[in-house]
Image (cartoon, rainbow, N blue to C red):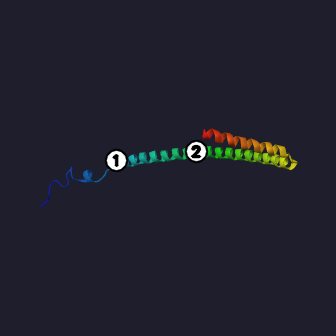
Amino acid sequence: MRRSNLNGPGFGETQYQPTEQMLEEENAQLEESLKGKVQALKSMSIDIGTEVRHQNKMISGMDDDFDKTGNFLEATMGRLKRLTRAGHWKLWLYLLLFAFFVIIMCWLIIRF
């Protein structure tokens, strides 16, 4: 027994096999999705590059600041060594009395 509707227009190749147009539409959708992801990755990598350049500038600035501070401290220590070698015992006495006075004043302010 033969069925008459097996080779009809509703059951044959057009209904169950994907056509070339359907495959092209699916490929176009996947391509658009992939384009969006690539664009997002590109944007993110550009932002990361910008941030890295900014951070490198900040690090260079900090390095320069640390060098300046180190030089300033070296100069200060040199002056302090010259002062101690000169034997100015009165200056050391004044410095010690001033520090003691400041500590006493802070203690009095905190206590009362």
Look at the picture and state if 33 lies above or below 3.
above
Residue topped by disc 2: 51
Q: Could you tell me which secondary element the residue under label 1 belongs to? A: helix
For the residues labelled 2 and 1, say whether their Cβ atoms are less than 8 Å apart.
Answer: no
Q: Residues within 10 Å of mark 2 (few under 14, many from 20)?
A: few
Residue nearest the viewer, comparing 77 with 68: 77
Q: Position of residue 75 (x, y in %)?
A: 80, 46
Q: How many tags in the picture? A: 2
Look at 54% across and 47% down and name the residue there. 45
Amino acid found under the numbered disc labelled 2: Glu
Residue topped by disc 1: 21
Which disc is residue 32 wearing?
Answer: none
Residue nearest the viewer, comparing 28 with 74: 74
Amino acid found under the numbered disc labelled 1: Gln
Q: Position of residue 86 (x, y in %)?
A: 87, 47
- Judge from the rendering whether residue 83 lies leftward or rightward of residue 56; answer left or right: right
Q: Quadrant of the N terminus?
A: bottom left
Q: Quadrant of the C terminus?
A: top right
Q: Position of residue 40 (x, y in %)?
A: 48, 45
Look at 61% across and 43% down and name the residue there. 54
Q: Position of residue 83 (x, y in %)?
A: 84, 46
